[in-house]
Image (spheres, rainbow, N blue to C red):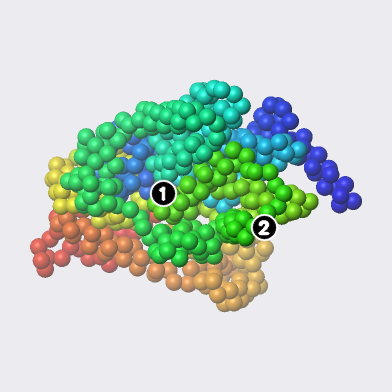
C-alpha cells in the first residue's frame, strides 16, 4: 500500500514538475511562483528592521528627489543605492499591501526556473534528471536564508533571481562553446546584464560577480573562447551596473565627495563623515581555527552570523562531506565514478570562491542566499560520489530531504505583522508651517519609514544615531536648524505588545464565558499560575464582568521617560533640548501592528541651572 501511494505521488510530481517539455517547465515555474506568493501572504506584512530604517524611506526619497533636502534620516544607510527600494516603495505603498506582498513573493519564486536549469546542466545525462532537476531546485527554495526573506524587502532574495539567472546562462554558454566552435555571444551578454543588475541592486553581490568570473575560466573549451566569454560577461555587467546605479553614485559623489558615502571614507575624506572605513566586522571569524571550521561553528551557534537564528544542517553536511571526499582521494579510496563534468566543475568554482569571499568580507548569513539555493544540488552530487552506486541516489535524496525538513522546521523571519489593506499608516503630528520646520530623528532606532507619510515640505535630519558623524556633519545640522523657524524631534516610544496580547486573550476568555460570574475565578487562577502572563484580573464597576490587565501599568510611562532622557542627551551634543511639556505619544502602523512614537518640540539648550521643563509633568500630556 505504501509503495502504491509513493508511486502515485511520484506520478503527480512527474506530471507537474518533471521537465519533459517546455510546457512542463512553464507549468512548474508558474506553480512555484504562485506558491511563493501564497506563502508570502501567509507570513504577513513585511516589517523588518531594515525596512523601517531605510528601505521604505530610500525608495520614497529617490522618487521624490529628497536626497539633497534631508540629511541622513535613515542613518548611514540613507545613501545606499535606492534602485530596488524604489520598486519596494511602489509595491508596498501604491498597491494594496497584500497584493504587493503576493507579487514580491511570486517574483522570489521565479528563481526556481534558472535554478532548475543549473541542475539540468549539473546532472548531465542521468536518466532521472528530468525529475531530479526541479525537485533539487525546489529544495533550494526551502533553505533557511531564502525562506527568511520570502516576500520581504531585504533585497537578497530579489537580487538572487538575477545572480542565479546569470549562473545558468554562463553554464549554457559554456555548454555551447564545448559543443561547437562558437562563443555564444547572446548568453554571455545576457548573463552579464543580469549580473550587473544584481550588483546595482545590492553591492554585496560583487562577491558573486568575482566568483562567476572565475567559474567562467574553469568551464572548459577553447581558451580564446573562455577569455572572450569572460570579457563579454565583464563588459556587459559593468555596463548594466553603470546604467542602473551610476546616476546615484555620481549624485552622491558630487553632493558629498564620496560615491559610497559614508562608507570607505578613510579613502575619500568626505567632510560630513568621520574619516573611517565603515564596516560591520562583528560577524567575522576571529582566528585561523574559526576560519577553517566556520560552517560548523555558525551552524551550532547561528547567532555568530545573524541577528535572527535559523536552524539548518545543510552547511555542516556540505563541509563534512567535502572533507570526507578530499580525504578519500588523499588516501586512495576511489569509487567507479565518471569524472565530474565541466558544468559541475564550473559550479564548484563559483560556489567555493563565493563562499570564501563571503566569509572573508561579510560573514553575514543572509548574504549566502545565492549559494544556499545551489547547495542542495551540490550536496546531492557529493553524497552520490561518496557512496556506492547502488545506494547513492537513494541516500542522496534522503539527506537532501532531511536538510529541507530541518530548514522548514527551524525557519525564522525578520519580522511580520498581520495584513491591512494599507501597509503603512502614521498618525499626523501638529506641525506649524512645515515649509519652515526641521524634524530631527533622534537616536539609533529605525524611524525614517514614517517620513513618507509626514508633510513633505519639512526637512528631516538624523542626529545622535549610528551615522559616523564628523564635526562637519554637526555644523551642517546646526545650519539646517538655523535656517528654519520651527524645530521638532521624533523619538521612539515603547511598543506595548503586552496590552495587545492580553486583548487577544480577553477575547478568547469572553468567547469561553470566562469573563463573568464564576469564570472570573478561573481567570484569576490563570493569572496566578501562568508566570509569563504578567497580568492581574480587573472587574468593572458593576462587578459582574472581568478582564486581564497588565500587572504593572506604570512601566510604559517609565519607558517613555527613559527614551526622552536618552534623546535629550543626544540633542545636547548640538546645543538643543526637548521641550518636555510639549511631548506627546502618537501611533503608527505597519499592517495591523502598532508602532508608537513620540513627538516633541525642540528648543535651544537652556543656560546651566535653568532647567528644561518637568519631565514627569510632560508624561501627563500622554493621551
Badge 1 is on which residue?
50
Q: Position of residue 86 (x, y in %)?
A: 40, 35
Q: Is residue 471 above or below residue 68?
A: below
Q: Is residue 344 above or below residue 65?
A: below
**Which residue is pictured at 43% across the width and 49% down the height?**
357
Q: Eyeballing the image, is 233 above or below 504?
A: above
Could you classify mark 2 by the number of other residues whose Cα lies within 10 Å: few (under 14), some (14-19), or many (20 or more)? few
**444 or 456, nearer to the observer:** 444
Badge number at residue 240 = none
Residue under the image location 67 percent in, 37 percent down: 124
Image coords of residue 445 (percent x, y): 35, 55
Percent of width and height locating residue 519: 65, 70
Left/right placement of residue 442 relative to residue 102 reads: left
Front disc: 1 or 2: 2
Task: Tell me the residue that label 2 is attached to.
Answer: 333
- Which residue corresponds to the image point at 68% horizontal and 34% vertical from the top-left? 28
Q: Residue furthest right?
A: 1
Q: Kindly tell me whether residue 534 is visible in this rendering.
A: yes
The image shows a total of numbered marks equal to: 2
Say few, some or many: other residues with alpha carbon within 10 Å of mark 1 (under 14 / 14 to 19 / 20 or more).
Answer: some
Q: Is residue 579 left or right of residue 555?
A: left
Name the residue located 71 percent from the left edge and 36 percent from the top edge.
125
Does residue 584 lie above or below 270 as drawn? below
Quadrant of the rendered structure where residue 611 is?
Answer: bottom left
Q: Position of residue 286 (x, y in %)?
A: 39, 64
Among the 4 quarters of the image, the one containing residue 287: bottom left
Say which element carries label 1: helix
Say which of 593 and 31 sits in front.
Answer: 31
Amino acid at each position: 500500500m505504501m509503495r502504491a501511494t509513493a508511486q502515485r505521488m511520484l506520478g503527480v510530481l512527474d506530471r507537474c514538475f518533471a521537465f519533459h517539455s517546455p510546457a512542463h517547465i512553464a507549468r512548474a515555474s508558474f506553480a512555484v511562483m504562485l506558491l511563493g506568493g501564497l506563502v508570502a501572504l501567509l507570513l504577513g506584512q513585511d516589517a523588518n528592521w531594515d525596512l523601517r530604517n531605510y528601505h521604505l524611506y530610500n525608495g520614497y526619497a529617490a522618487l521624490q528627489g529628497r536626497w539633497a533636502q534631508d540629511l541622513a534620516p535613515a542613518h548611514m544607510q540613507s545613501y545606499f543605492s535606492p534602485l530596488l527600494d524604489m520598486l519596494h516603495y511602489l509595491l508596498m505603498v501604491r498597491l494594496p499591501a497584500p497584493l504587493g506582498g503576493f507579487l514580491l513573493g511570486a517574483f522570489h519564486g521565479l528563481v526556481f526556473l534558472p535554478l532548475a536549469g543549473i541542475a539540468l546542466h549539473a546532472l548531465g545525462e542521468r536518466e532521472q534528471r528530468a525529475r531530479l532537476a526541479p525537485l533539487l531546485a525546489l529544495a533550494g527554495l526551502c533553505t533557511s536564508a531564502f525562506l527568511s526573506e520570502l516576500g520581504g524587502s531585504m533585497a537578497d532574495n530579489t537580487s538572487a533571481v538575477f545572480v542565479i539567472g546569470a549562473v545558468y546562462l554562463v553554464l549554457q554558454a559554456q555548454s555551447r562553446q564545448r559543443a561547437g566552435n562558437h562563443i555564444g555571444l547572446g548568453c554571455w551578454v545576457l548573463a552579464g546584464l543580469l549580473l550587473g543588475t544584481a550588483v546595482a541592486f545590492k553591492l554585496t553581490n560583487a562577491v558573486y560577480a568575482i566568483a562567476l568570473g572565475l567559474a567562467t575560466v574553469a568551464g572548459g573549451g577553447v581558451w580564446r573562447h573562455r577569455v572572450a566569454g569572460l570579457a563579454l560577461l565583464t563588459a556587459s555587467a559593468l555596463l548594466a551596473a553603470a546604467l542602473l546605479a551610476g546616476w546615484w553614485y555620481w549624485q552622491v559623489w558630487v553632493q558629498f565627495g564620496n560615491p559610497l558615502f559614508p562608507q570607505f571614507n578613510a579613502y575619500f575624506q568626505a567632510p560630513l563623515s568621520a574619516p573611517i572605513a565603515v564596516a560591520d566586522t562583528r560577524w567575522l571569524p576571529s582566528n585561523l581555527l574559526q576560519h577553517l571550521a566556520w560552517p560548523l561553528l555558525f551552524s551550532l551557534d547561528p547567532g555568530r552570523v545573524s541577528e535572527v537564528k535559523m536552524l539548518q544542517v545543510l552547511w555542516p553536511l556540505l563541509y563534512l562531506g567535502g572533507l570526507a571526499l578530499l580525504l578519500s582521494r588523499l588516501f586512495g579510496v576511489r569509487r567507479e565514478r565518471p569524472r565530474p563534468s565541466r558544468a559541475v566543475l564550473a559550479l564548484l568554482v563559483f560556489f567555493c570562491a563565493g563562499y570564501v569571499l563571503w566569509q572573508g568580507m561579510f560573514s553575514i548569513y543572509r548574504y549566502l542566499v545565492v549559494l544556499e539555493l545551489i547547495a542542495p544540488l551540490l550536496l546531492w552530487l557529493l553524497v552520490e560520489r561518496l557512496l556506492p552506486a547502488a545506494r547513492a541516489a537513494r541516500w542522496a535524496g534522503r539527506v537532501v530531504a532531511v536538510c529541507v525538513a530541518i530548514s522548514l522546521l527551524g525557519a525564522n523571519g525578520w519580522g511580520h505583522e498581520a495584513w491591512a489593506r494599507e501597509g503603512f499608516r502614521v498618525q499626523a503630528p501638529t506641525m506649524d508651517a512645515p515649509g519652515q520646520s526641521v524634524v530631527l530623528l533622534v537616536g539609533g532606532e529605525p524611524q525614517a519609514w514614517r517620513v513618507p507619510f509626514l508633510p513633505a515640505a519639512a526637512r528631516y535630519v538624523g542626529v545622535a544615531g549610528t551615522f559616523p558623524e564628523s564635526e562637519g556633519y554637526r555644523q551642517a545640522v546646526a545650519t539646517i536648524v538655523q535656517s528654519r523657524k520651527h524645530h521638532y524631534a521624533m523619538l521612539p516610544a515603547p511598543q506595548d505588545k503586552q496590552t495587545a496580547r492580553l486583548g487577544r486573550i480577553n477575547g478568547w476568555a469572553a468567547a469561553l464565558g470566562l469573563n463573568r460570574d464564576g469564570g472570573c475565578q478561573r481567570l484569576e487562577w490563570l493569572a496566578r499560575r501562568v508566570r509569563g502572563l504578567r497580568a492581574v484580573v480587573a472587574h468593572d464597576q458593576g462587578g459582574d464582568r472581568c478582564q486581564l490587565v497588565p500587572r504593572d501599568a506604570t512601566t510604559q510611562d517609565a519607558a517613555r521617560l527613559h527614551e526622552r532622557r536618552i534623546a535629550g542627551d543626544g540633542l545636547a551634543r548640538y546645543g538643543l533640548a526637548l521641550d518636555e511639556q510639549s511631548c506627546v505619544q502618537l501611533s503608527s502602523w505597519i499592517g495591523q501592528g502598532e508602532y508608537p512614537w513620540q513627538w516633541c518640540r525642540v528648543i535651544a539648550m537652556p543656560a546651566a541651572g535653568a532647567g528644561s521643563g518637568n519631565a514627569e509633568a510632560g508624561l501627563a500630556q500622554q493621551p
